[in-house]
Image (spheres, helix red, strand yellow):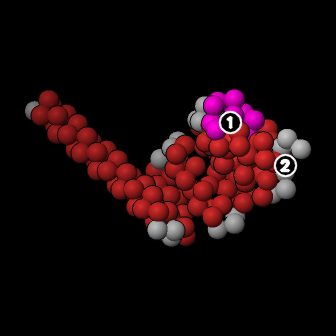
Amino acid sequence: MKYFLFSLFLLFFHLTVFSQRKQEKSLLDKALQKIERENYEGALADLTSHLETDSLNAFAYYKRGFAHAMLMRHQNALDDFNRAISLQPGNAQFYSERGIAKLNLKDKDGACLDWEKAGEMKFEPARDLFNEYCNQ
């Protein structure tokens, strides 16, 4: 009987976790679709809800930062890019986007440092930005 109850508990737990993960992925997928349709406010809402249950998802922070940037909320974008980088420091694209946010906040030196770092990781768009804004 104990074995049966334990097995039932494990099954219920597994189904609950699976259902929660499916819902999280669904919110992230919805947010990405909204970004494609340029519905940045809707994407922000979905990404924020997603991050409430998956606070270690660097990609979700990155995408939320992008949505903030598109709405000209550069400080919010910078905060999200910082969080994405803290979770996944080896992603050159995160540094490149953070550099753009810094430039929009009038921190050209910080932007150049980010683009230089992303360029060292062989991210060509960051090298282009560095050459355009920093080699003067």
Q: Which residue is drawn at 19% across and 34% down?
A: 6
| The image quarter in which residue 105 lies | bottom right
Q: Main secondary structure of the magenta part?
A: helix
Q: How busy is the neighbourhood of tag 2: few (under 14 within 10 Å), some, or many (20 plus)?
A: some
Going by the numbered disc 1, the residue's amino acid type is Ala
Residue under pointer 1: 118
Q: In this view, does 95 lie above or below 104?
A: above
Q: Is residue 71 above or below residue 18?
A: below
Q: Is residue 122 left or right of residue 24?
A: right
| The image quarter in which residue 44 lies | bottom right
Quadrant position of the C terminus in the picture: top right
Q: In this view, does 2 lie above or below 101?
A: above
How far across and down, in percent of the image, does residue 25 sit?
Answer: 37, 51
Can residue 116 be seen in this snapshot?
yes
130 or 52, which lies in front? Answer: 130
Mark seen at residue 108: 2
Q: Residue at x 71, y 43 (%)?
A: 128
How far across and down, in percent of the image, does residue 60 sit?
Answer: 52, 50
Q: How busy is the neighbourhood of tag 1: few (under 14 within 10 Å), some, or many (20 plus)?
A: many
SS for callout 1: helix
Going by the numbered disc 2, the residue's amino acid type is Lys
- Give yes or no for residue 37 being in the magenta stretch: no
SS for callout 2: helix
How far across and down, in percent of the image, does residue 73 sit?
Answer: 70, 64
Residues shaded magenta: 114-124
User: As drawn, which residue projects farthest toward the right?
Assistant: 136
Quadrant position of the N terminus in the picture: top left
Using the numbered discs, state the Cα–Cα distance from disc 1 to disc 2 in whole angstroms.
15 Å
How far across and down, in percent of the image, does residue 118 sit?
Answer: 68, 36
Mark seen at residue 59: none
- Earlier residue among tags 1 and 2: 2
